[in-house]
Image (cartoon, grey):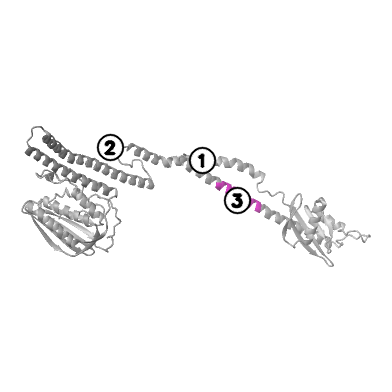
């Protein structure tokens, strides 16, 4: 397949060749028209000379016609007029009042019988004063017919000139054209190839830089060195943005793999140890039951982890459907509050219901319940004994706003941009004695909010608690409709779920 450089050169040569051919044709046609006008002027002048010759003979006091004794003889011009007319070149014909030929120049007499008759008949019928073409067997003429009024007669005179000398491509121009056009094309091809090569040098450098980025370990490199031109700079900026996204994705994938391996490694090790202990010979039934119970807990924990990963993976691929239906949030939130109070009793916390307004949204009731339970469970998990958790529901313009406020340990300002990432947990939380979660709950919450065209934000201060705010469009409000497939999780602070900064 030909390169772009070759195709551009060929395209330039094709355009240039077409322009040259058009220019040559225009020049030749213009030259032909100029020669034709010049020839028309000559034939008009020739006809005027014939008229003058007739007038000179008449003014000389001689009869234009020769007196003949035989009445049957054809009339002819007098010798004096014939002497005047013989001085003219070309095709000259004079007819009397009866339209009989009384003088024919040697050129007319040299014509064949048929051509001479055609010439004579054309002179009899032609319009006066206009240049008319006349096609003969061996030539093509330009003919002008004039009339000379005399005292007792009206002579018709004609003059014609051959068009044989007018050609579309004259020989004096054909040679230079055949020599100059190939030479011009050759020079133009060399210049076009050179210019195209210089224009594509930045593209070649861009390709070399892209070829150097061959795997995920080279994604830290960026394009731009030696790139000139507005279009190429835009292309480089677009590619750099894509490489940056790829780098982020690769880093997230590596981190995800490492975190998933870490989260699965410990329960698998514990599970293996419990199974080996239960299978050991001589173990007492009580110890075997205790080992199997601990193994079951680890299996349950891994099943929850795998289920969360499967949910996010399906959401990433757009295969997780969110069904749209009218959902009354007030009873749903009350149900979540009741569940949260049960969880709060075990943790020694007080779960309160704030103002709950009656609002309705379009969404998936199961997913919305999962969203609110995740947020409440997260608040209870990281709130020390004796603290409080409050859930409120309000309508703000055309939005439903659900807030989950706690008096827990809070989140450091430096950790806020990362809390919605998968498997992310602050170090001080990761070392909690109860082990905490696996760091997927907030990522799933973020996906559910995004799938409902809403926003999820957080305000927090270390040691003073956190407030998570879910904003959803009301049923019938702009943006409340859903198609059923949505991207799973966006980076914290991106998309429609902005990250709120701490107070």
Task: Give the numbered dot on residue 26.
Answer: 3
Which residue is disc 2 drawn over? Answer: 217
Q: Earlier in the sequence, mark 3 or mark 1?
A: 3
Which element type, helix, strand or loop, lies under badge 2? helix
Q: Which residues are magenta?
A: 18-33
Label 1 crowd (10 A; few <14 / some 14-19 / many >=20): some
Cα separation between marks 1 and 2: 43 Å
Cα separation between marks 3 and 1: 24 Å
Q: Could you say where residue 386 lies in the image, as x and y percent from the top left?
A: 5, 53
Which residue is pictured at 64% across the width and 43% down the height? 174
Q: Is residue 385 left or right of residue 23?
A: left
Which residue is disc 1 drawn over? Answer: 189
Q: Quadrant of the C terminus?
A: bottom left
Residue placed most toward the observer, 13 or 75: 13
- Taking 192 as reference, is 344 above or below it? below
Which element type, helix, strand or loop, lies under badge 3? helix
């Amino acid at each position: 397949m030909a390169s772009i450089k070759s195709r551009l050169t060929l395209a330039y040569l094709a355009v240039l060749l077409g322009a040259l051919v058009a220019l040559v044709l225009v020049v030749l046609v213009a030259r032909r028209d100029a020669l034709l006008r010049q020839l028309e002027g000559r034939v008009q002048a020739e006809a005027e000379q014939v008229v003058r010759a007739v007038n000179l003979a008449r003014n000389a006091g001689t009869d234009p016609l020769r007196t003949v004794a035989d009445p049957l003889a054809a009339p002819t011009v007098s010798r004096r007029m014939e002497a005047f007319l013989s001085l003219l070149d070309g095709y000259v014909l004079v007819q009397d009042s009866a339209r009989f030929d009384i003088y024919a120049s040697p050129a007319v007499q040299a014509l064949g019988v048929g051509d001479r008759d055609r010439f004579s008949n054309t002179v009899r019928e032609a319009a006066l004063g206009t240049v008319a073409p006349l096609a003969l067997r061996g030539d093509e003429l330009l003919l002008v017919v004039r009339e000379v009024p005399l005292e007792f007669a009206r002579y018709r005179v004609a003059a014609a000139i051959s068009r044989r000398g007018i050609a579309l491509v004259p020989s004096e121009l054909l040679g230079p054209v055949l020599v100059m056009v190939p030479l011009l094309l050759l020079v133009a091809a060399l210049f076009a190839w050179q210019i195209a090569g210089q224009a594509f040098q930045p593209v070649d450098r861009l390709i070399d830089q892209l070829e150097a980025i061959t795997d995920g370990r080279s994604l830290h490199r960026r394009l731009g060195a030696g790139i000139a031109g507005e279009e190429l700079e835009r292309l480089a900026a677009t590619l750099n943005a894509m490489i940056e996204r790829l780098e982020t994705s690769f880093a997230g994938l590596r981190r995800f793999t490492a975190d998933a391996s870490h989260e699965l490694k410990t329960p698998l090790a514990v599970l293996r140890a419990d199974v080996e202990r239960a299978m050991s010979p001589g173990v007492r039934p009580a110890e075997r039951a205790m080992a199997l119970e601990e193994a079951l807990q680890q299996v349950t924990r891994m099943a929850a982890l795998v289920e969360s990963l499967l949910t996010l993976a399906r959401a990433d691929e757009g295969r997780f459907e969110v069904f749209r239906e009218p959902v009354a949030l007030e009873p749903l939130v009350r149900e979540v509050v009741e569940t949260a109070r049960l969880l709060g009793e075990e943790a020694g916390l007080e779960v309160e219901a704030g103002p709950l307004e009656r609002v309705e949204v379009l969404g998936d009731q199961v997913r919305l319940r999962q969203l609110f339970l995740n947020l409440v469970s997260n608040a209870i998990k990281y709130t020390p004994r004796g603290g409080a958790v409050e859930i409120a529901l309000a309508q703000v313009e055309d939005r439903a706003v659900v807030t989950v406020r706690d008096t827990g340990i809070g989140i450091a300002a430096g950790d806020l941009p990362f809390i919605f990432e998968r498997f992310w947990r602050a170090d001080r939380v990761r070392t909690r004695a109860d082990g905490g979660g696996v760091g997927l709950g907030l990522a799933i919450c973020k996906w559910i909010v995004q799938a409902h065209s809403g926003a999820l934000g957080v305000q927090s201060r270390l040691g003073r608690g956190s407030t998570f705010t879910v904003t959803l469009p009301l049923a019938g409000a702009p943006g409340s409709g859903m198609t059923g497939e949505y991207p799973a999780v966006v980076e914290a602070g991106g998309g429609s779920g902005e990250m709120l900064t701490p107070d």
